[in-house]
Image (spheres, rainbow, N blue to C red):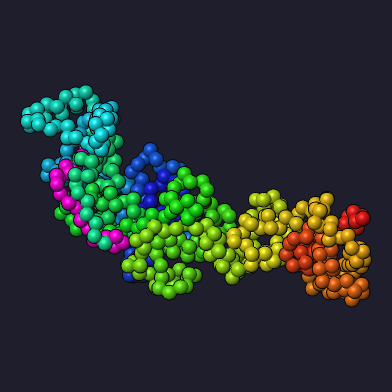
Amino acid sequence: MRYAPSPTGHLHIGNARTAIFNYLFARSHKGTFVIRIEDTDTKRNVEGGEQSQLENLKWLGVDWDEGPDVGGDYGPYRQSERKDIYQKYIQELLDKGLAYESYLTEEQLTKMREEQEANGEMPHYEYEFAGMSEEEKAAKIQEAKDAGLTPVIRIHVPKGKTYEWDDIVKSKVSIDSDTIGGDWVIQKRDGMPTYNFAVVIDDHLMEISHVLRGDDHVANTPKQLMIYEDLGWEAPKFGHMTLIINTETGKKLSKRDESILQFIEQYRALGYLPEAMFNFITLLGWSPVGEEELFTRKQFIKIFDEHRLSKSPAKFDQKKLEWVNNQYVKTADVSEITDLVLENLIEGKRIPADPDTNTIQWVRHLTELYMPQMSYTQQIVELSDIFFNQPDVLTGDEQKELVDDDSRKAIEDLRGKLEKLDRFTATQIMAAIQGVRADTGVKGRKLYMPARIAATRTMHGPAIAEAIELIGKEKSLANIDKTLSQMK
């Protein structure tokens, strides 16, 4: 099995799914998993694209046996480094008369397509030497060479031939050669092979037995089968996974759809956990036996069955992803989540870029407090706002909670008790609040809500004692004094 990304951008959810399914297939069958970089489209390659692909796959927990960074017996593993290999097989097809040099310019091809569209035809390549004798053809080619034109290499597409394969996901698939669009290019003017040619050479020479890829590759398969047939090779077993659709819109997940985050790096920055992302992505178009939804990577390897790949579109549900990640956050090691929270708070300018030991310990307490409710750790910036920004003015609803005479009595008593605490911990703070109840007789909401509003300057937030502890003694007392001064 192989995953063969193009270094044209960052790792997309759809590409990550392709990698994960091929990885699980290989590991479940005790096979070899290969990473191959398909970088023949030099105009679209972006700096750092390959690094992004590899780093984010590793972050997800995907490892490979062969690839550009680890080597292997079937390298090189970048297509740009395999030009001589491709040239050998291009020459073989030329020698067999199955491929030929094509000298039509881009302007001529564009004009051809425009005329076809005007006539209501599907755009297709028309053989430029049609009806010519060998002498006329040779003269035409010589004329193009004399004009300094650089040819592409096209392969002859047989007429009226049906290409069929037994798809791992779709079962029987057949496509007529007449729908392919005519003879297609296998080598571009710059000497680089096209995708549909190079992928065949690579898969064969690297002994790839099975290929799982997206549904958008179905139309490429007959072209690739054509090359396998022309070179006398056996094709691998193909499986084309259904599209991923946006649950909210019902439309195909498009990189232009800005209503949903689609790149792994974006989820990393938000504080999603790799195990959760691996889990969620694996269930996009594949389902296990039973109702269980949370599995470790090792469990997925053990239970993965390619025959359970769905024939229906996979639904990308952002809320479901948040739920899955929350399950992992709640049970994660506090230190792991604290590290992520520290990054989020630094980026949100809540704490210094080089926090001291006391700040780090404070953030750990904050993390423990909010872990159960965080869908992803970046939420901590908003959730923890009460510890960084206490408002000068209370809301109308908060003021209503303080109009009772019991409110002032309870708040004043609480202030005295908090000021006397030697250790400002949640346990001691809760004991102080209980002491207010014993001393004043104020209890229930009439005690807890005024105490919360006075010490934290808001009626919302986490458990009252933990919230007051995190705000700290000095700031809590200042908040209480401000509240008392504003009470009527």
Percent across and percent down for residue 402 are: 86, 60
Q: Which residues are magenta?
A: 154-170
> Is residue 218 in view from this perspective?
yes
Whether residue 66 sits left or right of residue 427 in the image: it is left
Name above or below for residue 184 compared with residue 374.
above
> Is residue 72 in view from this perspective?
no
Percent across and percent down for residue 150 are: 24, 31
Name above or below for residue 370 compared with residue 260.
below
Q: Residue at x 33, y 43 (%)?
A: 40
Percent across and percent down for residue 222 are: 23, 50
Q: Quadrant of the C terminus?
A: bottom right
Res. 315 image quadrant? bottom left
Percent across and percent down for residue 80 are: 33, 45
Q: Residue at x 45, y 68 (%)?
A: 297
- Indicate whether residue 167 is drawn in magenta: yes
Whether residue 113 sits left or right of residue 456 in the image: it is left
Q: Residue at x 43, y 61 (%)?
A: 284
